[in-house]
DNA sequence: TGGACCTTTCAGAAGATACTGAAATGGTAG
DNA sequence: CTACCATTTCAGTATCTTCTGAAAGGTCCA
């Protein structure tokens, strides 16, 4: 089994996927579980995960739950079997959409709201110090508006890409990509 | 100073930028320093950073160096002044390009290479087990090719977006974005 | 050459994050 | 209701990351 190339590929991918996740603020184990399920030909149960990745029951449970919350993994019940099985989303475009949507909600939204708040504060400040001092309020404000414009543009780009994926327009995305060169 | 709205905005933004960074695998302090410099009307020196963010000299030095390595911050020398000053890249499109280019090089490239390697291994495995057992090699291989296609498409999209920014075609990016709705 | 001034480095400390193992909880069938 | 099986929770622990403070390293000028 150790020198079976298919098995080698499987283990290599799982390891690398976990390593990469670390630099993206995702725990190594969670990513490894995701990779394991992504490659699995059929749903796995908690004990399969524990055994294959050598993690504790607690860790497996917690991470599977989190993956489920992200919407990247589904819980499956089987008749005459109390165990729960888990299956990964295998459409990479769908995965992309899920990840972007969730990260936007959890991590981008707060900064967008902060920018809006900052712009309000800058307006307040501008009124307060009108005709006073050498402070360049315009330049200060510009830093905020530019970030806002950027996030709006990015928002749109991601919508476009995910729409392209959803409609099965993968070739279109490629086409778009080629345009850029 | 505490109730000056401009100052409030500045502190709020720095705080939030640092918090957000944590979920993206970037250290809080490094992000705060970046935000501080991004909003600063003129270059700051190490002591300014230490004072304003209440961090040690070692931390300031290390993080400034890292930001410089990323290309997000520039080191500036002044005549008749031994101190070094630091200034942030303020063009957000440029920032985006830098961040994507660096993360791609450091974090996406390894997974791409792994995928290629996996595909080679799968071909080896296919030969080895030809006409044997019930293992569905095709399905297994498909998981890898789909990720490869996806990364290629993404690559192209990012090239397009960064080109749009580079050419000053920000309105185009917005237009593209609107298309998606 | 020596001293003033700054930056970098790094060992140890602090802090954050994730994991373990076991107890508590939940749910199902007899 | 009880026994059984599986999942969840959580306090304690391990591990990894980042920070601190001080010493070492550079550089410039008198």
Image: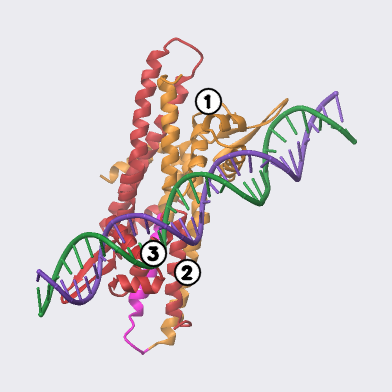
Chain colours: A red, B orange, C green, D purple
Residue A166 image point, x, y percent = 26, 56
Do the residues bearing badges 2 and 1 touch, measured as CB atoms within 8 Å? no
Secondary structure type for disc 3? helix
Q: Which residue is mark 2?
A: B116
Q: Callout 1: few (<14), some (14-19), or many (20+) C-alpha neighbours within 10 Å? A: some
Q: Looking at the image, which is closer to me, A70 or A142?
A: A70
Residue A173 versus residue A108 in the image, above or below? below
Are both tags, 1 and 3, on one chain? yes
Start-end of magenta stretch: B131-154
Nearer to us of marks 2 and 1 is 1
Nearest the viewer among A139 and D17 is: D17
Q: Quadrant of residue B20?
A: top left
> On the rendered structure, is D13 left or right of B81?
left
Gap in angstroms between the C-alphas marked 2 and 1: 47 Å
Protein chain holding label 1: B
Q: Circle 2: is it few (<14), some (14-19), or many (20+) Cα within 10 Å?
A: some
Q: Chain of mark 2?
A: B
Q: Find residue C11 and report its horizontal and vertical position in percent.
A: 66, 51
Instruction: Find residue B141 and report its horizontal and vertical position in percent.
Output: 38, 74
Magenta stretch: residue B5 in it?
A: no
Q: Which residue is found at the position 43% from the left and 60% from the top? A: A28
Give the labeled residue for mark 3: B147
Q: Quadrant of residue B138?
A: bottom left
**Residue for point 50% across, 32% down:** B36
Say which label, 2 or 1, has the lower sequence index. Answer: 1
**Percent coordinates x, y for residue B99 in the rendering:** 49, 46
Q: Say which residue label 1 marks.
A: B41
Q: Quadrant of the C terminus of chain B?
A: top left
């Amino acid at each position: 089994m150790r020198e079976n190339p298919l098995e080698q590929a499987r283990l290599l991918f799982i390891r690398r996927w976990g390593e990469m996740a670390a630099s993206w603020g995702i725990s190594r184990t969670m990513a490894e579980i995701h990779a394991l399920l992504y490659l699995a030909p059929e749903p796995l149960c908690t004990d399969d995960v524990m055994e294959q990745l050598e993690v504790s029951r607690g860790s497996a449970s917690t991470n599977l739950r989190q993956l489920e919350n992200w919407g990247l993994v589904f819980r499956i019940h089987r008749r005459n079997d109390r165990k729960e099985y888990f299956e990964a989303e295998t459409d990479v475009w769908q995965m992309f959409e899920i990840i972007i949507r969730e990260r936007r909600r959890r991590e981008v939204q707060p900064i967008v709201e902060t920018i809006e708040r900052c712009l309000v504060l800058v307006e307040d400040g501008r009124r307060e110090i009108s005709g006073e001092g050498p402070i360049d309020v315009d330049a200060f404000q510009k830093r905020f508006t530019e970030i806002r414009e950027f996030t709006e543009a990015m928002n749109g780009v991601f919508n476009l890409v995910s729409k392209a994926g959803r409609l099965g327009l993968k070739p279109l995305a490629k086409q778009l990509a080629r345009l850029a060169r």
